[in-house]
Amino acid sequence: MRRQARTLLTGLAAAGALALILWLPVSFLASGEPQARPSPQAFEKGKPRRIVSVNITSDEILLALIPERLAAVSVLASDPGVSNVVREAAAVPVKVRADPERILALEPDLVVIGGQSIHVVRQLEELGVRVVKIQGFESLAWVEGLIRTLGDEVGERPRAERLIAAMRGRLDAVRDRIIGRSRARVLTYSFGGRTVGRGTLFDDVIHAAGGENVGATRGISGWKSLSLEQLLVADPDIIVLHTSQRWAPGFHAEFLSHPALRTVRAFRENRVHQLPGRLMITTSHHIAETVEALAAVIHPGAFRRVSR
Protein backbone atom coordinates (compact mmCIF):
# COMPACT_ATOMS: atom_id res chain seq x y z
CA MET A 1 0.00 0.00 0.00
CA ARG A 2 2.87 2.39 0.83
CA ARG A 3 4.36 1.71 -2.59
CA GLN A 4 1.00 2.54 -4.21
CA ALA A 5 0.79 5.73 -2.20
CA ARG A 6 4.29 6.80 -3.21
CA THR A 7 3.47 6.07 -6.84
CA LEU A 8 0.43 8.35 -6.85
CA LEU A 9 2.10 11.19 -4.94
CA THR A 10 5.21 11.02 -7.12
CA GLY A 11 3.02 11.26 -10.21
CA LEU A 12 1.39 14.36 -8.73
CA ALA A 13 4.57 16.06 -7.54
CA ALA A 14 5.04 18.11 -10.67
CA ALA A 15 1.50 19.37 -10.41
CA GLY A 16 2.03 20.35 -6.79
CA ALA A 17 3.96 23.48 -7.65
CA LEU A 18 1.20 24.55 -9.99
CA ALA A 19 -1.32 23.86 -7.25
CA LEU A 20 0.35 26.58 -5.21
CA ILE A 21 -0.32 29.07 -7.99
CA LEU A 22 -4.02 28.26 -8.09
CA TRP A 23 -4.56 28.18 -4.35
CA LEU A 24 -2.40 31.18 -3.35
CA PRO A 25 -5.22 33.74 -3.44
CA VAL A 26 -7.32 31.55 -1.17
CA SER A 27 -4.98 29.95 1.29
CA PHE A 28 -1.36 30.91 1.72
CA LEU A 29 -2.02 34.63 1.98
CA ALA A 30 -4.16 34.06 5.05
CA SER A 31 -3.04 36.31 7.88
CA GLY A 32 -5.95 36.47 10.28
CA GLU A 33 -6.96 39.89 8.97
CA PRO A 34 -10.76 40.12 8.92
CA GLN A 35 -11.06 42.57 6.06
CA ALA A 36 -9.31 44.60 3.40
CA ARG A 37 -6.74 47.08 4.65
CA PRO A 38 -6.81 50.59 3.16
CA SER A 39 -3.62 52.52 2.56
CA PRO A 40 -2.80 55.30 5.05
CA GLN A 41 -3.55 58.09 2.57
CA ALA A 42 -6.43 60.29 3.66
CA PHE A 43 -9.61 59.92 1.61
CA GLU A 44 -10.37 62.71 -0.81
CA LYS A 45 -13.82 64.18 -0.77
CA GLY A 46 -16.28 62.41 -3.03
CA LYS A 47 -16.43 58.88 -4.32
CA PRO A 48 -13.60 57.38 -6.37
CA ARG A 49 -14.51 57.44 -10.06
CA ARG A 50 -11.70 55.50 -11.72
CA ILE A 51 -11.31 52.26 -9.81
CA VAL A 52 -8.87 49.55 -10.86
CA SER A 53 -9.37 46.03 -9.51
CA VAL A 54 -6.35 43.73 -9.75
CA ASN A 55 -7.79 40.75 -7.87
CA ILE A 56 -10.50 38.25 -8.78
CA THR A 57 -12.17 38.68 -5.39
CA SER A 58 -12.50 42.44 -5.76
CA ASP A 59 -13.51 41.96 -9.42
CA GLU A 60 -16.51 39.92 -8.32
CA ILE A 61 -17.54 42.25 -5.50
CA LEU A 62 -16.99 45.57 -7.29
CA LEU A 63 -18.77 44.39 -10.44
CA ALA A 64 -21.78 43.85 -8.18
CA LEU A 65 -21.40 47.21 -6.43
CA ILE A 66 -20.12 49.82 -8.91
CA PRO A 67 -19.54 48.39 -12.42
CA GLU A 68 -20.01 51.83 -13.94
CA ARG A 69 -16.93 53.17 -12.11
CA LEU A 70 -14.46 50.41 -12.92
CA ALA A 71 -11.63 51.55 -15.16
CA ALA A 72 -10.23 48.01 -15.24
CA VAL A 73 -10.61 44.54 -13.73
CA SER A 74 -8.08 41.74 -13.47
CA VAL A 75 -7.30 39.41 -16.36
CA LEU A 76 -8.77 36.56 -14.29
CA ALA A 77 -12.22 38.13 -14.45
CA SER A 78 -12.58 36.83 -18.02
CA ASP A 79 -11.41 33.30 -17.21
CA PRO A 80 -14.43 30.96 -16.85
CA GLY A 81 -12.29 28.47 -14.96
CA VAL A 82 -11.87 30.79 -11.99
CA SER A 83 -14.32 33.68 -12.47
CA ASN A 84 -17.98 33.96 -11.54
CA VAL A 85 -18.33 37.25 -13.43
CA VAL A 86 -17.21 36.51 -16.99
CA ARG A 87 -20.32 38.09 -18.50
CA GLU A 88 -20.19 41.16 -16.27
CA ALA A 89 -16.45 41.60 -16.86
CA ALA A 90 -17.02 41.75 -20.62
CA ALA A 91 -18.50 45.23 -20.11
CA VAL A 92 -15.15 46.48 -18.75
CA PRO A 93 -12.83 46.65 -21.77
CA VAL A 94 -9.54 46.95 -19.88
CA LYS A 95 -8.05 43.93 -18.10
CA VAL A 96 -4.89 44.25 -16.02
CA ARG A 97 -2.26 42.30 -14.13
CA ALA A 98 -0.25 43.51 -11.14
CA ASP A 99 1.82 45.79 -13.38
CA PRO A 100 2.36 49.22 -11.76
CA GLU A 101 3.09 51.00 -15.05
CA ARG A 102 -0.07 49.67 -16.68
CA ILE A 103 -2.12 50.53 -13.60
CA LEU A 104 -0.73 54.06 -13.38
CA ALA A 105 -1.44 54.67 -17.05
CA LEU A 106 -5.14 54.29 -16.24
CA GLU A 107 -4.94 57.25 -13.81
CA PRO A 108 -6.91 55.49 -11.04
CA ASP A 109 -8.15 57.21 -7.91
CA LEU A 110 -8.47 53.82 -6.18
CA VAL A 111 -6.67 50.50 -6.72
CA VAL A 112 -7.83 47.27 -5.06
CA ILE A 113 -5.18 44.55 -5.10
CA GLY A 114 -4.21 41.31 -3.38
CA GLY A 115 -1.86 41.61 -0.42
CA GLN A 116 0.59 39.23 -2.09
CA SER A 117 1.54 41.96 -4.60
CA ILE A 118 3.30 43.94 -1.90
CA HIS A 119 5.98 45.36 -4.21
CA VAL A 120 3.29 46.80 -6.48
CA VAL A 121 1.39 48.17 -3.48
CA ARG A 122 4.49 49.98 -2.25
CA GLN A 123 5.22 51.53 -5.64
CA LEU A 124 1.65 52.77 -6.00
CA GLU A 125 1.51 54.17 -2.48
CA GLU A 126 4.85 55.94 -2.91
CA LEU A 127 3.32 57.73 -5.90
CA GLY A 128 0.30 58.79 -3.85
CA VAL A 129 -2.21 56.32 -5.28
CA ARG A 130 -4.96 55.24 -2.89
CA VAL A 131 -4.66 51.46 -2.44
CA VAL A 132 -6.76 48.82 -0.69
CA LYS A 133 -5.02 45.52 -0.01
CA ILE A 134 -7.00 42.29 0.30
CA GLN A 135 -5.79 39.52 2.60
CA GLY A 136 -7.29 37.03 5.00
CA PHE A 137 -9.75 34.55 3.45
CA GLU A 138 -10.50 32.62 6.63
CA SER A 139 -14.31 32.60 7.08
CA LEU A 140 -17.72 33.53 5.73
CA ALA A 141 -17.73 36.40 8.23
CA TRP A 142 -14.50 37.62 6.64
CA VAL A 143 -16.25 37.71 3.24
CA GLU A 144 -19.02 39.85 4.71
CA GLY A 145 -16.44 42.14 6.28
CA LEU A 146 -14.63 42.54 2.98
CA ILE A 147 -17.82 43.42 1.12
CA ARG A 148 -18.66 46.01 3.77
CA THR A 149 -15.13 47.46 3.68
CA LEU A 150 -15.11 47.76 -0.11
CA GLY A 151 -18.58 49.30 0.05
CA ASP A 152 -17.22 51.95 2.39
CA GLU A 153 -14.14 52.52 0.22
CA VAL A 154 -16.21 53.23 -2.88
CA GLY A 155 -18.93 55.14 -1.01
CA GLU A 156 -21.64 52.54 -1.49
CA ARG A 157 -22.34 51.09 1.96
CA PRO A 158 -26.09 50.57 1.30
CA ARG A 159 -25.34 48.54 -1.83
CA ALA A 160 -22.80 46.51 0.13
CA GLU A 161 -25.33 45.78 2.85
CA ARG A 162 -27.85 44.61 0.26
CA LEU A 163 -25.24 42.31 -1.25
CA ILE A 164 -24.45 40.88 2.18
CA ALA A 165 -28.16 40.42 2.91
CA ALA A 166 -28.62 38.50 -0.35
CA MET A 167 -25.66 36.28 0.50
CA ARG A 168 -26.98 35.64 3.99
CA GLY A 169 -30.41 34.84 2.59
CA ARG A 170 -28.98 32.08 0.43
CA LEU A 171 -26.93 30.68 3.31
CA ASP A 172 -29.97 30.75 5.60
CA ALA A 173 -31.98 28.87 2.98
CA VAL A 174 -29.33 26.13 2.93
CA ARG A 175 -29.33 25.96 6.73
CA ASP A 176 -33.11 25.59 6.81
CA ARG A 177 -32.97 22.68 4.36
CA ILE A 178 -30.29 20.70 6.17
CA ILE A 179 -31.29 21.39 9.77
CA GLY A 180 -31.53 18.17 11.78
CA ARG A 181 -29.60 16.10 9.22
CA SER A 182 -26.47 14.19 10.22
CA ARG A 183 -23.14 15.64 9.15
CA ALA A 184 -21.17 13.59 6.64
CA ARG A 185 -17.37 13.56 6.96
CA VAL A 186 -16.01 15.56 4.01
CA LEU A 187 -12.44 15.64 2.74
CA THR A 188 -11.21 18.04 0.08
CA TYR A 189 -8.31 16.81 -2.01
CA SER A 190 -6.33 18.61 -4.69
CA PHE A 191 -3.45 17.72 -6.95
CA GLY A 192 -0.28 17.58 -4.92
CA GLY A 193 -2.23 15.87 -2.12
CA ARG A 194 -3.33 19.07 -0.39
CA THR A 195 -6.39 19.33 1.83
CA VAL A 196 -8.11 22.07 3.81
CA GLY A 197 -8.04 22.41 7.59
CA ARG A 198 -9.12 24.84 10.29
CA GLY A 199 -8.84 28.60 9.85
CA THR A 200 -9.78 28.60 6.18
CA LEU A 201 -12.80 29.81 4.29
CA PHE A 202 -13.52 26.38 2.87
CA ASP A 203 -13.59 24.85 6.34
CA ASP A 204 -16.40 27.31 7.09
CA VAL A 205 -18.06 26.40 3.77
CA ILE A 206 -18.08 22.69 4.64
CA HIS A 207 -19.69 23.43 8.01
CA ALA A 208 -22.30 25.74 6.46
CA ALA A 209 -23.12 23.04 3.91
CA GLY A 210 -23.83 20.52 6.65
CA GLY A 211 -20.58 18.59 6.65
CA GLU A 212 -17.73 17.83 9.02
CA ASN A 213 -14.29 18.73 7.70
CA VAL A 214 -12.00 15.70 7.94
CA GLY A 215 -8.93 17.90 7.59
CA ALA A 216 -9.95 19.94 10.63
CA THR A 217 -10.77 16.89 12.74
CA ARG A 218 -7.32 15.50 11.94
CA GLY A 219 -5.73 18.62 13.40
CA ILE A 220 -4.79 20.32 10.13
CA SER A 221 -4.70 24.12 10.02
CA GLY A 222 -4.63 26.01 6.74
CA TRP A 223 -3.81 24.05 3.60
CA LYS A 224 -1.44 21.11 4.05
CA SER A 225 -0.46 17.88 2.35
CA LEU A 226 -2.27 14.68 3.26
CA SER A 227 -0.56 11.45 2.27
CA LEU A 228 -2.50 8.67 0.60
CA GLU A 229 -1.97 6.50 3.68
CA GLN A 230 -3.56 9.23 5.82
CA LEU A 231 -6.46 9.49 3.40
CA LEU A 232 -7.05 5.74 3.67
CA VAL A 233 -7.02 5.89 7.46
CA ALA A 234 -9.36 8.91 7.52
CA ASP A 235 -11.87 6.96 5.37
CA PRO A 236 -14.09 10.00 4.55
CA ASP A 237 -17.76 9.67 3.65
CA ILE A 238 -17.34 12.20 0.82
CA ILE A 239 -14.33 13.39 -1.15
CA VAL A 240 -14.50 16.70 -3.00
CA LEU A 241 -11.77 17.03 -5.61
CA HIS A 242 -10.30 20.35 -6.59
CA THR A 243 -8.97 19.71 -10.07
CA SER A 244 -8.17 21.63 -13.19
CA GLN A 245 -7.25 20.19 -16.54
CA ARG A 246 -5.24 23.33 -17.17
CA TRP A 247 -2.99 23.01 -14.13
CA ALA A 248 -2.99 19.25 -13.64
CA PRO A 249 -4.18 17.35 -16.71
CA GLY A 250 -5.06 13.78 -15.90
CA PHE A 251 -5.20 14.17 -12.12
CA HIS A 252 -8.91 13.36 -11.85
CA ALA A 253 -8.67 10.12 -13.85
CA GLU A 254 -5.44 9.08 -12.12
CA PHE A 255 -6.91 9.64 -8.68
CA LEU A 256 -10.17 7.85 -9.39
CA SER A 257 -8.42 4.84 -10.90
CA HIS A 258 -5.93 4.30 -8.08
CA PRO A 259 -6.45 0.75 -6.74
CA ALA A 260 -5.56 1.61 -3.13
CA LEU A 261 -8.65 3.83 -2.91
CA ARG A 262 -11.17 1.10 -3.63
CA THR A 263 -11.58 0.46 0.11
CA VAL A 264 -12.38 4.08 1.03
CA ARG A 265 -16.03 4.64 1.96
CA ALA A 266 -16.42 7.59 -0.43
CA PHE A 267 -15.33 5.37 -3.32
CA ARG A 268 -17.41 2.39 -2.25
CA GLU A 269 -20.52 4.55 -2.04
CA ASN A 270 -19.76 6.56 -5.19
CA ARG A 271 -19.45 9.83 -3.30
CA VAL A 272 -16.37 11.37 -4.92
CA HIS A 273 -17.38 14.71 -6.41
CA GLN A 274 -15.88 17.59 -8.32
CA LEU A 275 -17.23 21.14 -8.03
CA PRO A 276 -16.46 23.81 -10.64
CA GLY A 277 -13.11 25.50 -10.06
CA ARG A 278 -14.76 28.93 -9.92
CA LEU A 279 -16.77 27.81 -6.89
CA MET A 280 -13.85 26.14 -5.15
CA ILE A 281 -11.68 29.26 -5.15
CA THR A 282 -14.13 32.14 -4.90
CA THR A 283 -13.77 34.39 -1.86
CA SER A 284 -16.57 36.82 -2.69
CA HIS A 285 -20.33 36.75 -2.14
CA HIS A 286 -20.45 33.99 -4.78
CA ILE A 287 -19.32 31.69 -1.97
CA ALA A 288 -23.05 31.29 -1.25
CA GLU A 289 -23.33 29.30 -4.48
CA THR A 290 -20.41 27.15 -3.32
CA VAL A 291 -22.24 26.36 -0.09
CA GLU A 292 -25.40 25.52 -2.05
CA ALA A 293 -23.52 23.21 -4.43
CA LEU A 294 -21.66 21.43 -1.64
CA ALA A 295 -24.81 21.07 0.48
CA ALA A 296 -26.52 19.38 -2.47
CA VAL A 297 -23.61 16.93 -2.62
CA ILE A 298 -23.65 16.22 1.12
CA HIS A 299 -27.46 16.13 1.49
CA PRO A 300 -28.90 15.30 -1.95
CA GLY A 301 -32.26 14.39 -0.48
CA ALA A 302 -32.72 17.89 0.90
CA PHE A 303 -32.26 19.45 -2.52
CA ARG A 304 -34.09 16.95 -4.71
CA ARG A 305 -36.75 18.67 -6.75
CA VAL A 306 -40.32 17.70 -5.99
CA SER A 307 -42.02 16.36 -9.12
CA ARG A 308 -45.44 17.71 -9.99
Image (cartoon, helix red, strand yellow):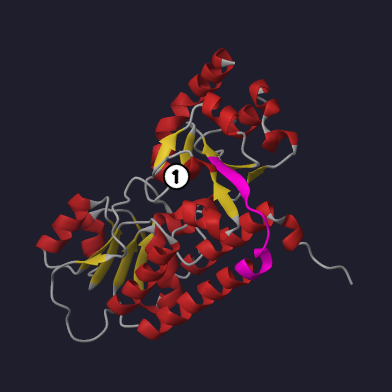
* Residue placed furthest toward the right: 308
Residue shown at the point (11%, 63%) measured from the top left: 127
**SS class, disc 1:** loop
Residue labelled with disc 1: 197
- Seen in the picture, residue 283 relative to 185 is either above or below; the reply is below
Q: Is residue 175 left or right of residue 307?
A: left
Residue shown at the point (40%, 61%) measured from the top left: 57
Residue shown at the point (29%, 74%) measured from the top left: 50
Residue 254 seen in this snapshot? yes
Q: Can you give x and y, in whole percent of width and height, for residue 172 in the image?
A: 58, 72
Q: Is residue 122 left or right of residue 134?
A: left
Residue 93 seen in this snapshot? no
- Seen in the picture, residue 48 relative to 61 is either above or below; the reply is below
Relative to the observer, which residue lies in front, 119 or 225?
225
Bounds of the magenta segment: 175-188
Which corner quadrant of the image does residue 132 belong to? bottom left
